Amino acid sequence: MKPSTLDEVYRKYMMDVYRYMRLLCRDDATAEDLVQETFYRAYIHLENYKEESVKPWLFRVAYNAFIDMKRKEKRSMVRDHEFFHGLADPPASRPEAQVLRNETMEEVREWISALPDLQQQALLLYDMNHFSYQEAANIMGVTLSHFKILLFRARQGLRRNRERGDERE
C-alpha cells in the first residue's frame, strides 16, 4: 500500500530510516541530519513516485544521501563527532540495564563497522531492516547474485569479528 502523504511516510518509516543511518554513520547527529535530508528529498519527489512499496524507495533515497555525505566528507576537513556520541540515547529505567545495553550495542556497531562498506549495507538492509533480497539489491544498485554474495560475506565477517572479540576477553 502506498502512503499518500509525506506525513504518513514520515510517521511510518522515520525510525527505520534513523536506525539505518545511525548504523551506517555511527553518529547520532549525522544520522539525524541524514534523516532530514532523506525526507527533504522524499518531499520533493514523493508525488512522482509510482511504485507500490515506498519503503525500499525511501531507503534508496537515504542510501544516496549517505553516499553524497561521504563524498562531501572526502572533499572537506574531517571533524570530531565524539561530542555528539550518546546524546540521543534515551534514559533507561535502570542505569545498569542501560550501561549493559550500550556496551552490547557498541560491540555490535564495532563488529559491523569493521566490515567493508558494501557488506555493511547488505547486512543492514536485509538483516536489520528486513528488506527482501531483491529490494535490498535494488537499493544498493547491485545484481541479486552480487547482493547475496555481499550478505554471505558480511555474515562471515561479523562472525569472525565477534569471535575475535570473544578471544580478547
Image: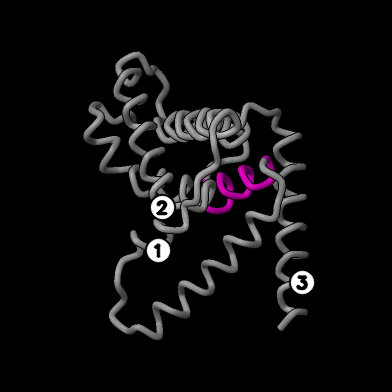
Alpha-carbon neighbours of circle 1 within 10 Å: few (<14), some, or many (≥20)? Answer: few
Q: As shown in the figure, which amino acid type bears the numbered disc 2?
A: Asp
Q: Residue at x 58, y 52 (%)?
A: 127
Q: As shown in the figure, which amino acid type bears the numbered disc 1?
A: Gly
Please name whichever residue, 5 or 70, is drawn nearer the observer in this view of the structure: 70
> Horizontal and vertical percent for residue 29?
38, 48
Please name whichever residue, 129 or 92, is drawn nearer the observer in this view of the structure: 92
Q: Are marks 2 and 1 in contact (CB under 8 Å)?
A: yes
Q: Are marks 3 and 1 in contact (CB under 8 Å)?
A: no
> Horizontal and vertical percent for residue 54?
39, 30
- 43 over 125 or under it: above or below: above
Q: Per the image, is 19 magenta?
A: no
Say which mark, if any, is on residue 86.
1
Please name whichever residue, 149 or 26, is drawn nearer the observer in this view of the structure: 26
Distance between the Cα atoms at labels 2 and 3? 27 Å
Boundaries of the magenta span? 118-130
Residue furthest front as drawn? 77
Query: Looking at the image, is mark 3 or mark 1 earlier in the sequence?
Result: 1
> Horizontal and vertical percent for residue 122?
64, 44
- 29 over 7 or under it: above or below: below
Element class at badge 1:
loop
Residue indicated by mark 3: 164
Q: Residue at x 35, y 26 (%)?
A: 42
Q: Residue at x 62, y 49 (%)?
A: 123
Residue indicated by mark 2: 28
Alpha-carbon neighbours of circle 2 within 10 Å: few (<14), some, or many (≥20)? Answer: many
Q: Of helix, strand and loop, which mostly describes the magenta segment?
A: helix
